[in-house]
Amino acid sequence: MALLRQREAHQMREPIRVALPAEKTVLEALRAGDEVRLWGVVYTARDATHERIVAELRRSGVLPYGLQGQVLFYAGPTPARPGLPAGAIGPTTARRMDAWTPALLDAGVTATIGKGARSEEVRRACVRNGAVYFAAVGGAAALLGSCVVAAEVVAWPELGTEALMRLTLEGLPAFVALDSVGGDLYASAPREWQMEVDE
């Protein structure tokens, strides 16, 4: 019952507004399970884009296209409808980017957005760099697309929906899934649920 009361109290809190790109002190104050609304600039990056970013990083030793201190959103917007900057935008399964993520966090990316659990290597990289991973809800691409107020291709337009794009968000809903102190929502939530059931 105590866990149930804790969860109810947590659910009654207003979502935390996070302006992106965020200062490290802001990210370090977030905890796994926090509900957030994301405002500001993010860059879309899926598999093909990650390969190119990491290749550039290895060649030059720095992140390309001003990605230092920025947020990567694992998504590829569908073509914009008339009068809108972007179409639907659903988060891609984050684990597909796990092989590249530690190197990108070490190089200066401060946060990522996707869906689903991450590897232990990514969790450790978040702790090492004071970074966070935000989980967006899958299956709500139209809703998430309505939170995009500006979009422009930054690099690799030949990749189509996988091009590196700069998006401006207004209130995109998400949860902190990995925090900067080692918290992992995908690990802790099932344990809490089981304890609640056992009570």
Image (spheres, rainbow, N blue to C red):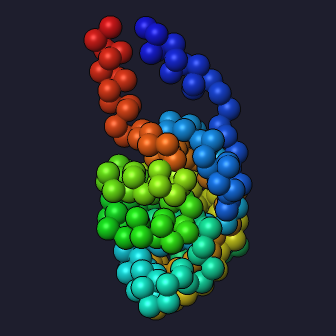
Where does the image place residue 166, in percent across and percent down from the top left? 62, 75
71 lies above or below 10: below
Q: Nearer the viewer, residue 106 or 14?
A: 106
Q: Quadrant of residue 152?
A: bottom right
* Residue 84 in view in this figure: no
From the viewer's perspective, tell me whether residue 82 is left or right of residue 131: right
174 lies above or below 84: above
Q: Quadrant of residue 167?
A: bottom right
Q: Nearer the viewer, residue 99 or 181?
A: 181
- Residue at the image point whose x is 57% and y is 26% from the top: 11
- Residue at the image point whose x is 60% and y is 46% from the top: 28
Q: Nearer the viewer, residue 58 or 41?
A: 58
Q: Nearer the viewer, residue 27 or 156?
A: 27
- Residue at the image point whose x is 54% and y is 67% from the top: 109
- Residue at the image point whose x is 63% and y is 41% from the top: 29
Where does the image place residue 33, in percent across and percent down from the top left? 50, 36
Query: Which quarter of the image is occupied by the C terminus?
Result: top left
Query: Which quarter of the image is occupied by the N terminus?
Result: top left
Where does the image place residue 115, in percent across and percent down from the top left? 41, 53
